[in-house]
Amino acid sequence: MNVSGQTVLITGASGGLGQAIARRMREAGAIVRITARRTEILDALAGEIGATAIAADLSDRADVARLAEASKDVDILVANAALPGSGALDGFSPDQIDRALEVNLRAPIILSRLLAPEMQARGRGQIVLMSSLLGKTSSPGSSIYCATKFGLRGFGQALRADLRGTGVGVSVIFPGFVSEAGMFHESGTKLPSYIKTITPGACADAVIGAIEHDRGEVDVAPATLRVGVKFSEIAPAIAARVSDRLGARKIADQMSSGQSKKR
Ligand SMILES: NC(=O)c1ccc[n+]([C@@H]2O[C@H](COP(=O)([O-])OP(=O)(O)OC[C@H]3O[C@@H](n4cnc5c(N)ncnc54)[C@H](OP(=O)(O)O)[C@@H]3O)[C@@H](O)[C@H]2O)c1
């Protein structure tokens, strides 16, 4: 589906990747609707690119339903919002776990459930789910985040199979570490020199490419990370030992302390 002229709803549009996706969508000629909680960022972005802003808290089930009701006409859903969910499990209260599950996993599922039938009725549409390479492999200090991002992968694959032939596609995006903006960048984590990052713009291009070519899964990461992830899917125990030796725990600790306020 060519995004030009299509109406797109982007969640998490006040964040690093969401802003980049919204700007690229607009450049590509889409009619853009953006949502998040921080209205000052949303309104500024909406003014800049001529988008419509809808404030919603995706940890609030009534807000998710309200957002879906206001978005029945969208051709493309980009479910991008998430909480970092980083840190050891015993550092999360049950409420914090529930919030991460609601924002990262339940909201994309419910928005898909409520918007896909409308797309099917029109015979066209695309649902894009923002996962992470941590939706394919794990690292220390990521149990909650991985639960949601692995969950999105399974949900997206199965939903894609269910919707095959209806004109509605489902794409799952798997970014690696993103520099310049976003939750990893803001954590202040320093990566070893052998781990390379990608930009928010590369993620936005991947989203548009996935929609235009109806790609089921797209990794957005340097080749070395992509190969490492493939290896970990074949031999997870060996891969975990190697990544421990390469300093995965130190990276996880930095991310967890840099992101602890976003639980
Ligand atoms: N940055 C990376 O390195 C990286 C790597 C892999 C995957 N990803 C994925 O990419 C996506 C975007 O990440 P990012 O780096 O752009 O993160 P970010 O800058 O922290 O942005 C997160 C977005 O989610 C929204 N959000 C959080 N809680 C919400 C809630 N309760 N209700 C509504 N919106 C909420 C935030 O908006 P408000 O706070 O305004 O509500 C914000 O717009 C996420 O799915 C993330 O898991 C990121």
Image (cartoon, helix red, strand yellow):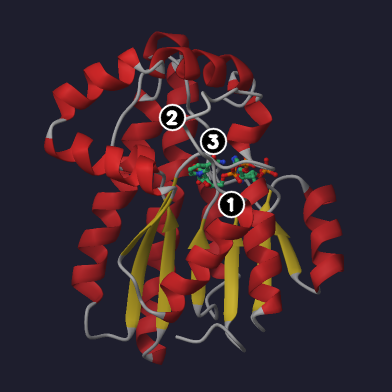
Q: What residue type is labelled 1?
A: Asp
Q: Which amino acid does label 2 sit on?
A: Asp
Q: Which residue is drawn at 54% across and 21% down?
A: 255
Spatial CA span between label 3 and label 2? 11 Å
Which quadrant of the figure has residue 26?
bottom right
Please state the quadrant of the image where ligand 1 appears: top right
Q: Residues within 10 Å of mark 2 (few under 14, many from 20)?
A: some
Q: Position of residue 63 (x, y in %)?
A: 58, 52
Q: Which residue is drawn at 62% across and 19% down?
A: 258
The mark nearer the N terminus, 1 or 2, is: 1
Spatial CA span between label 1 and label 2? 16 Å
Q: What residue type is labelled 3?
A: Leu
Which quadrant of the figure has residue 5?
bottom right
Closest to the observer, 236 or 46: 236
145 above or below 64? above
Residue occupied by mark 2: 98
Residue occupied by mark 1: 63
Say which element carries label 1.
helix
Say which element carries label 3.
loop
Q: Assess mark 3: CB under 8 A from ligand 1?
A: yes
Q: Position of residue 239 (x, y in %)?
A: 22, 26
2 above or below 67? below
Closest to the observer, 14 or 193: 193
* Position of residue 116 in the picture relative to residue 205 (left or right): left
Residue occupied by mark 3: 83
Q: Assess mark 1: CB under 8 A from ligand 1?
A: yes
Q: Where is residue 18 in the image (x, y as percent from the top left)?
A: 63, 55
Closest to the observer, 204 or 54: 204
